[in-house]
Amino acid sequence: MGAAMAANLAKAGYRVSIWNRTTPSAGLGVAAAGGCAIASTVEEALTGSQFVCSCVTDGPALRSILFAAARNLKALVAKDAIVIDFSTIGPVEARGIAEQLSQRGLRFVDAPVTGGDIGARNGTLTFMVGGTVEDLERTRPLLNTMGKKVVHAGSVGNGQSLKLVNQLLCGVNLLAVVEAFQVAEAFGMDRQLAVEACGGGAAGSWQLANLGPKIIVEDHQPGFRAAHLLKDLRFLRDALHNGSTRPNPPCFELALSAFERVVQMGKGELGTQTVWMAHPPPHKSDR
């Protein structure tokens, strides 16, 4: 995700220096081919930057980059630099990181994305932004280069909250695709017919159009890993439990359980479409 996003910025004329936590990485090749400079250290990537963009697994990973004991972030970056995080780290973590950055005289925008690896490559992502209007407007040209829609969700952390709503829809919609395929097969029909007939109508969804065909041919390569969606659903569970109201959405519980089974099966590093393995049709004795 991050590599394709960085490449799109470089192709648009931005000077982009990137660093990855793990090397070698296929993403580094994608970014380099797009015109990005590959930094050998975090400090090299950060030096003089007006915008610090991150796309990592979780909050602890982001903290390890921004707040390493020997790293003076404020001294490295340009004056009035803004940190923009595209990761899904949850609203509590986002607000905590924003507070720590504020104490160092730096501003923070949480801008998690949706649109998958396809959207990252094609520059058609949607950004859900939490931050001040001023900071949003400063970052908007970058976001418009990498995506097609920017939605201001409110103050810092609200972008994360909106992303969790998005992840709930992704998980539940994908389970619906799996069940629709199971019903089609029970009727003796080719599952591809469901994609062709339903994809363009009221029942259509990104999951049906993009992941449905992968389920049919058992292509499990990750555009987005199942373990990462489970992480996000757990963020949502925690946010619901910590809120003033505690709804118990039944569809959410189904999605959470299904992706927990995927990870327990050792399939977490595969794509979310792998959930078809963990969401089988009911046994005849259960009907």
Image (tube, grey):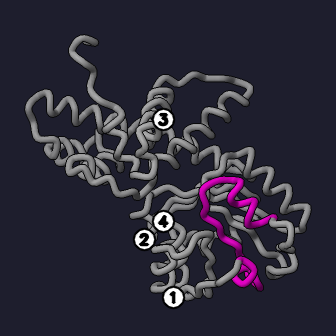
Residue 151 visible in the shown view: no
Amino acid on which the number 3 mark rests in the picture: Glu
Circle nearer the viewer, 2 or 3? 3
Residue in the image at 59% along x and 37% along y: 234
Q: Give the residue number, with chain letter if any, for mark 1.
A: 35
* The quadrant where residue 110 appears: bottom right
Q: Which mark is residue 27?
A: none
**Is label 3 in contact with label 4 (beta carbons under 8 Å)?**
no
Q: Position of residue 202 (x, y in %)?
A: 29, 40
Amino acid on which the number 4 mark rests in the picture: Lys
253 relative position to 201: left or right:
right
Crowding around mark 4 (Cα neighbors within 10 Å: few <14, some 14 to 19, many 20+) is some
Where is 102 relative to 187, above or below? below
Q: Residue furthest left?
A: 188
| Highlighted magenta segment, given as a residue range | 42-67
Q: Looking at the image, which is closer to me, 216 or 153?
A: 216
